[in-house]
Image: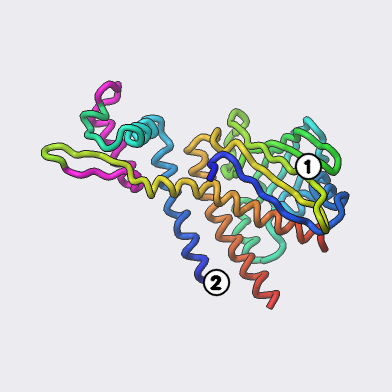
Amino acid sequence: MSTDRIEKKILLRAPRARVWRALSDSAEFGSWFGLKVDGPFVAGATIRAVLVPTTVNAEVAKAQKTHEGLVFEITIEQLEPEQLFSFRWHPHVIERGVDYSAEPTTLIVFVLEDAPGGVMLTVTESGFDQIPLARRAKAFSANEQGWSIMVGVLEEYVTRAQ
Amino acid sequence: MRSSAGAMAEPRVSAPIFAALGDETRLRLVSRLCHEGPMSIARLTAGTRVTRQAITKHLRVMQGAGLVRSTRRGRESVWRLEARRLEAAQHYVELISKRWDAALGRLRKLVED
């Protein structure tokens, strides 16, 4: 397994224009990713995004409160309508008052392709090997909490479905 | 779904590993033990500007994180890597990967509903 790169493929049973809007409209992107984004996605622009807690579960929202209001910066690279969307960010920025601007970023690329019944979306995040080990350690402990929360949300969905 | 707690226990193990590796000297020690195999502190110190005491201190930190261990050979200690613990460091990427799974699950819900 690569330590530098993550690749995900997901078949979305929705029109290509719908998927594109969910990615390229900053408000829609924020709604599924869990961010409040300040302004539209425009190639070359650097946009502020603020972490917002989920509305799914009050307890989870409470746990996420510790990270609420943390500011991300997203630098948009490419927007090719209904084909490709890419941006850069600092993965898992979790500390307040730390200037990350000099640190390397990871590159996130979304690629849309027609597939039977919908759109095949491929997302890659790469550049983890450039992130300092100490930072990875910190991101890791934050992520651990994130993952615990995720399991809780999953449990809730499963329980509700039954 | 208590079984998930077991899966989460492993990542908990990895954070001190990253912390222990977050130092240039320690990374160099790991690299040497990785490429040259088990060796004594005397050999690890030879040819570096780092003192024997400093090397020992770094090795102890890494030992605390379960990255290396020492065995007695006559009058000296021989240090070796604990390869299995080092592999645990790979969980960093696995966890970010899981985060993407969750996010894409929410994206699917949004566009398919």
Q: Secondary structure at mark 2?
A: loop
Count of marks placed on residues: 2
The numbered dot on residue B112 is none
Q: Residue furthest bottom?
A: A162
* Left or right: A149, with A33 as reference point: left
Badge 1 density bin: few <14, some 14–19, many ≥20, Cα 10 Å: some
Query: Label 1's element?
Result: loop
Check the residue under mark 2 and report the chain it is in.
Answer: B
Q: Closer to the camera, B76 or B59?
A: B76
Q: Residue drawn 83% across and 46% down?
A: A25
- Residue for point 62% across, 56% down: A64
- Residue at the disc numbered 1: A38
Mark 2: give few (<14), some (14-19) or many (20+) Cα within 10 Å: few
What's the mark number on residue B1? Answer: 2
Q: Is residue B64 magenta?
A: yes
Image coordinates of residue A73 in percent, x first then y, are: 69, 38
> At x 72% / y 43%, what residue is drawn?
A49
Quadrant holding the C terminus of chain A: bottom right
Q: Mark 1 is on which residue type?
A: Asp
Query: Is residue A13 toward the left or the right of residue A155 in the image?
Result: right
Report the magenta residues as a range: B46-72
The vertical placement of A134 against B92, above or below, is above
